[in-house]
Amino acid sequence: MMLGQALRDQQRELVVFRNRLLLAGFGILAAFGILATRFAWLQVVQKDHYHTLAEANRISVVPVVPNRGIITDRNGEILAANFSAYTLEITPGRVANVERAIDELAEVIEVTPRDRRRFRKLQEESKNFESLPIRTRLSEEEVARFAVNRFRFPGFEIKARLFRSYPQGEVASHAIGYIGRINEPDVKRIEAQGLATNYKGTDHIGKLGLEGAYEKELHGLTGSEQVEIDAGGRAIRALSRNEPISGNNLQVTLDLQLQKVAEEAFQDYRGALVAIDPKTGDVLALVSKPGFDPNLFVDGIDPVNWDALNNSPDKPLNNRALRGQYPPGSTIKPFLALAALEYKKRTPEFAISDPGFFTLPGVAHRYRDHKVGGHGSVNLHKAVVVSCDTYFYGLSNDLGIDNIHRFMTQFGFGARTGIDIEGELTGIQPSTEWKWQRFKQKWYSGDTISVGIGQGYWLTTPMQLAAATATLANDGVVVHPRLLKAVQDSKTQEVKALHQPMGERLPFKPEHLALIKNAMIDVTKPGGTAARAGAGAPYTIAAKTGTAQVIGMKQGEKYDEKKVKEVHRDHAIFIAYAPAEDPKIALALLVENGGHGGSTAAPIAREVFDFHLLGKRPAKRQKLGDDEPGEVPPPPQ
């Protein structure tokens, strides 16, 4: 019994074993079936997808940055260009200890404290995976020394890059502007304009002046290159290339040599000058003194130079031509005289007896003339020639501030001229409404008296004053200043000249314009306040001097320039155009704390006119500000 039972147990175990074996076989077959199905899915259905991913691991698309367009003056002289140089860059995310690595690098090639400061600044502004320059413009020897030690510096790389160059240095720096590294606000602006793709690989962007205003023209179109890379991420070979399109070249209206003459004429003074061709609106010179070297900003300006520029009492970064707001002083008297004729408040024959002061009816307060004892009998012509304050006190009172405002806004005062670079301010052309909105105060007659000699609330920019002078020279046809003259297409090399349309003709009577222009001519003749500017000139100049006060003085107090701090001295202002019969240049200039317009500002204008009209450079520069008879502004009322 026991043996039979044992045999029956073996039979059953065998059956169980076979069943288990079959079940395991089915399981293995099912697993292989699933695996085969998965393989088929990956190899057949998903073939294209995974082929693309595999290629992506092997091929990298690298942006190719276009060459930036160059900028030339109206005669083809270079204002902004590019040059190629080697730069040594670090990707901080791939370096364990950046400071220690830079210390080791300094044993191989020179790394100055300025290089370190600039790198830290860039590191603060950039992302950790971005490549940042630690040294720029390496020599061939430095490149070779680093190449030998390349294995010691993972995360370091030599690159060939284009650098912006401003060969004229400080000359016309405020007009040209500069480029700088792209920062967070730039990125947001680029993305908002839908240009993010076109700026891949680009490190710099135009910041100010022409570089900023015409960034789209200058930048070009970014290309791309497919590069095969190895497991270490190093490029092996280029597979294909989509060439970038270089930025367009710009020709601007500036005359570089005239610009240099104008800047040198300022000597050590601060100030601004704008010269315009009244027939076209071309800005021939745009001066803001002192200037700055835009080359400092290309690699990222270091803190030392930035502090020197930003904290300088001379404010070299301030574009005085567009952003300087000053009282126009007596330079507005020709415009007020024209308003008097147009509004029939004065006739050419009407004359006053000038005692040297003006009083409002029923008021004892005296508004003094700059000439003690007055100018005697003064008609409108003489009032402009000798700059008689008393005459214009009474005239402005008769005109009224709102008529003055209405007339002057026709010339562009109180508004931007529309010059094609950013940063222009509007100045202030006051009115009763303006004062109420600004101060919640009513307008007083005394306010009008001050405005009548270009003081008080009235503020203008040199650009506004130059455009208004050009409009007057152009017989009342409004002049819109511009800096861009032509664009050269980088693909076709075709040059497209830009034609700025002239503005409307203001409805002035020709005989009134002729009277004012003749008075401005006599300003530059003996007896006029700008006789120094016209002395010996082989062409005719029409002009008007002006002096604007910086600080107030008490009634009866006499202004003594020698007893006043330099920064508190009067500003010297001058407007002019020449030749008077057929104007080819009109300008406005201001010399900060320069004193009299006739002795400080007028000689600068004469040098500019002589060069532009005669090709004559000053043989010996006389020191500006020599004493000579001229107008001195009366104390503020």
Image (cartoon, grey):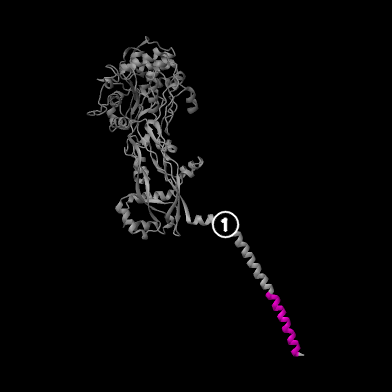
Range shown magenta: 2-21
Any magenta on residue 8?
Answer: yes
Of 441 and 557, which appears nearest the observer?
Answer: 441
Please identify the dominant SS of the magenta region: helix
The quarter of the picture where residue 378 lies is top left
The extreme right residue here reads 1
Q: Residues within 10 Å of mark 1 (few under 14, many from 20)?
A: few
- Is disc 1 placed on a helix, strand or loop? helix
Q: Which residue appears at 41% of the width and 39% of the height?
A: 247
The amino acid type found where label 1 is placed reads: Lys
Residue 209 seen anywhere in this rendered image of the structure: no
Q: Identify residue for label 1.
A: 47
Which quadrant, please, contains the N terminus?
Answer: bottom right
Q: Is residue 253 above or below residue 579?
A: below
Residue 155 seen anywhere in this rendered image of the structure: yes
The quarter of the picture where residue 252 lies is top left
